[in-house]
């Protein structure tokens, strides 16, 4: 087992990172022992990981972070860093390493306030690790101010600080930032590769793994969730039945409300798991008295946390809606393929009856219009249109075709 085992279908990228991790380890060893550093090092201070949704950009960046922090015995004997079981690897992978800072968008943007402490930390030496690693999961969500803060830190990094930025494409990142990063582009893993990973790493039955990988078309995290979470499979089944219910206006409005309510329930469930723990930890750190009474001067800090949690709930709701819209798009893509007699693989073969009814109930042109309606809904949500209004407009368009 190593940190590279979870890089599904990314052998080329893994090879580049493996070589860089070896040179990074040699750099730290040279700095601490006074020996000459390696020549023509493959390690650099900033990396940009891009790829389509589900390719595993964040997982790849985190595996690299773990390899940089590896303190396993094989590394000390000249082996490849990234054993996967030492304290450095383990804490980096689970997100508790003191010298691996992860930044993710709480709302629709990463604000300058969210980056201020992180940028400040990037200029400090590692506390107990080998590198100070800053992992930005949603670099495409940096706004102008936060992007400029990152740019300054990337332009003049501390000697043992490395920035790992993740985004869907290079065009999503400020040109001045991406020009200072080494770029690695990930590809969508094959369905077979994802199914194999689910069997090996998650212990999923081969048939269930194959169905989940096929349904998500190589999206690693969605496939993992679909294969291991019965509730996720139930939600997907409900979404895929939605087009058959849109026979009149009232049904369209009810279906839209149900989609939005389901997304809100997902956001609420996540909040119940995370918000209470966050709030209690902050209260303890601020010295709350017994009974929960807060010291003077801490109201602003608590208000900032509440605002952050509210933004996160909003994003979680929209992410859940987007997942449902992705499933609908995949369904109509299959319908279109069947209507055109295409030989592309059908992703939703498990709902054959629904596919057949939709194929008979419309033309290729009407199916294209429905796919466009779903895309328009996603665009509207990105522009912060009220979710219910956006989804109602979509369901009405799906009915009209």
Image (spheres, rainbow, N blue to C red):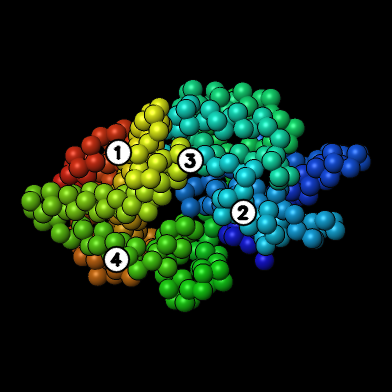
Furthest-front residue in this view: 290
* Local secondary structure at mark 3: helix
**Label 2 close to label 4 by CB (< 8 Å):** no
- Is 36 positioned to the left or the right of 260 in the image? right
**Label 2 – label 3 distance at C-alpha:** 22 Å
- Residue at 35% x, 39% y: name it: 293
**Label 1 – label 3 distance at C-alpha:** 37 Å
Furthest-right residue in this view: 35
**Label 1 close to label 2 by CB (< 8 Å):** no
**Residue linked to disc 2:** 91
Q: Is residue 93 above or below residue 354?
A: above
**Label 1 – label 2 distance at C-alpha:** 36 Å
Where does the image place residue 262, in percent across and percent down from the top left?
25, 54
Where does the image place residue 288, in percent across and percent down from the top left?
41, 40
Q: Earlier in the sequence, mark 1 or mark 3?
A: 3
**Residue linked to disc 4:** 234
The residue carrying pointer 2 sits among few (fewer than 14), some (14 to 19) or many (20 or more) residues within 10 Å by Cα, namely some
**Residue linked to disc 3:** 285
- Residue at 54% x, 23% y: name it: 148
The residue carrying pointer 4 sits among few (fewer than 14), some (14 to 19) or many (20 or more) residues within 10 Å by Cα, namely few
Q: Can you tell which of label 2 and label 4 is closer to the viewer?
A: 2
Q: Earlier in the sequence, mark 4 or mark 3?
A: 4
- Is 199 positioned to the left or the right of 342 in the image? right
**Label 4 – label 3 distance at C-alpha:** 40 Å
The residue carrying pointer 1 sits among few (fewer than 14), some (14 to 19) or many (20 or more) residues within 10 Å by Cα, namely many
């Amino acid at each position: 087992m190593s940190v590279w085992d979870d890089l599904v279908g990314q052998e080329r990228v893994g090879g580049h990172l493996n070589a860089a991790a070896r040179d990074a380890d040699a750099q730290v060893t040279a700095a601490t022992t006074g020996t000459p550093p390696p020549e023509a090092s493959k390690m650099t201070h900033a990396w940009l990981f891009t790829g389509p949704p589900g390719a595993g950009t964040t997982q790849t960046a985190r595996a690299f972070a773990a390899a940089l922090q590896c303190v396993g015995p094989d590394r000390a004997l000249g082996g490849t860093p990234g054993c996967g079981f030492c304290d450095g690897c383990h804490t980096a992978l689970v997100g508790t390493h003191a010298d691996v800072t992860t930044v993710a968008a709480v709302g629709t943007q990463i604000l300058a306030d969210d980056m201020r402490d992180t940028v400040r930390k990037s200029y400090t030496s590692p506390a107990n690790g080998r590198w100070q690693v800053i992992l930005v999961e949603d670099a495409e969500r940096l706004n102008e101010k936060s992007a400029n803060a990152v740019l300054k830190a990337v332009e003049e990094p501390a000697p043992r600080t490395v920035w790992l930025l993740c985004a869907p494409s290079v065009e999503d990142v400020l040109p001045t930032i991406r020009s200072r990063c080494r770029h690695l582009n990930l590809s969508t893993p094959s369905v077979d590769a994802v199914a194999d990973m689910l069997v090996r790493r998650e212990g999923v039955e081969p048939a269930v793994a194959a169905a989940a990988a096929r349904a998500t078309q190589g999206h690693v995290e969605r496939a993992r969730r679909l294969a291991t979470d019965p509730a996720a499979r139930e939600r997907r089944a409900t979404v895929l039945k939605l087009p058959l219910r849109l026979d009149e206006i009232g049904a369209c409005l009810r279906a839209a409300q149900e989609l939005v309510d389901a997304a809100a329930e997902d956001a609420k469930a996540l909040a119940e798991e995370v918000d209470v723990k966050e709030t209690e930890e902050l209260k303890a750190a601020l010295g709350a008295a017994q009974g929960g009474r807060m010291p003077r001067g801490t109201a602003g800090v608590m208000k900032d946390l509440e605002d952050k949690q509210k933004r996160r709930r909003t994003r979680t709701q929209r992410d859940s809606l987007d997942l449902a819209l992705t499933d609908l798009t995949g369904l109509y893509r299959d319908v279109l393929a069947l209507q055109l007699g295409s030989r592309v693989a059908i992703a939703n073969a498990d709902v054959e009856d629904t596919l057949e009814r939709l194929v008979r109930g419309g033309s290729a042109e009407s199916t294209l219009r429905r796919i466009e309606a779903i895309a328009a809904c996603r665009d509207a949500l990105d522009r912060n249109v009220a979710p219910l209004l956006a989804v109602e407009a979509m369901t009405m368009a799906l009915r009209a075709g």
